[in-house]
Amino acid sequence: MNPQTIKVACSNCNLRELCMPVGLSDHDLNRLDDLVAVRRKVKRGETLFTNGEKFTSLYAIRTGFFKTCLATEDGRDQVTGFQMAGEVIGLDGIVNDQHSCDAVALEDAEVCVMPFDRIEEISREVMALQHHVHKIMSREIVREHGVMLLLGSMRAEERLAAFLLNLVQRLHARGFSQSELVLRMTREEIGSYLGLKLETVSRTFSKFVEDGTVEVKQRHVRILDTEGLQRLVNNPNNHCH
């Protein structure tokens, strides 16, 4: 696995309260990191679950990066999200007891498997955990909602700026750099997610580079002007009505 692989400790994971007794010390947390029961490795390009598959578990991503996608009627892949280490994947399955998308590893990954019936059982007994389950779900909904807003009214530059800021913010919350990231997804996958053509994504990256906003070396992106990106996203005059 390349050294750039994103890996988080249990203490940095969104699911930690569910698989660990509440009130553990940091020391115990670190020890538990090595003991989490069921882990599953997913090779780059393989699926963790597929559209229509029976829903049994939520997955905490321990290492690696995923995309969720759907095949459209004309056979294209519509990317619906990107998930990184420390985040939870599989919530889409709760509604109909089956998954509503494919989850594909963008690099070699490892997930911790949390059987949903066990989560329900524990959260019935422990109110604090029930609250946490709701928090995880609402966090996911808020993120999805943010994306819908992003796509609703923004031009290409604003979409890509918001996308980069969102990624780097999520990475930073996990202890990674505030300004540097390695894109696990292709330009094409970014385009699919943001509703932009591949050429538009490439052109917009080039414009950011020309403007001195970002530095791009293949998949390595360094944000040189965070404020500049934020201004792009927050400028209400740019949005069409």
Image (cartoon, rainbow, N blue to C red):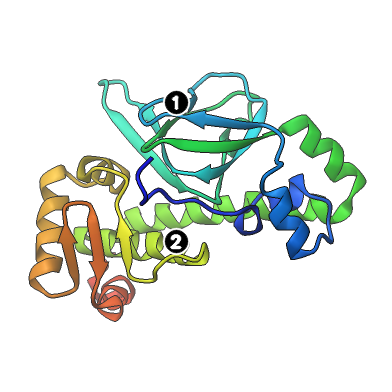
Residue found 31% across the figure and 70% down from its top: 233
The tag on residue 171 is 2
Q: Nearer the viewer, residue 197 or 189?
A: 189
Q: Eyeballing the image, is 108 above or below 187?
A: above
Residue identifier under label 1? 47
Q: Quadrant of the C terminus?
A: bottom left
Residue 119 placement (x, y as % from top left) = 78, 38
Q: Count neighbours of disc 2 (C-alpha within 10 A) and say few if under 14, some if 14 to 19, many if 20 or more.
A: many
Q: Eyeballing the image, is 129 above or below 94?
A: below
**If you read the primary sequence from the N terminus, does the residue marked by circle 2 or circle 1 appear first?**
1
Q: Nearer the viewer, residue 118 or 108?
A: 108
Secondary structure, mark 2, is helix
Residue found 33% across the figure and 34% down from its top: 78
Secondary structure, mark 1, is strand
Amino acid type at circle 1 is Thr
Residue 60 placement (x, y as % from top left) = 60, 43
Q: Eyeballing the image, is 40 above or below 224?
A: above
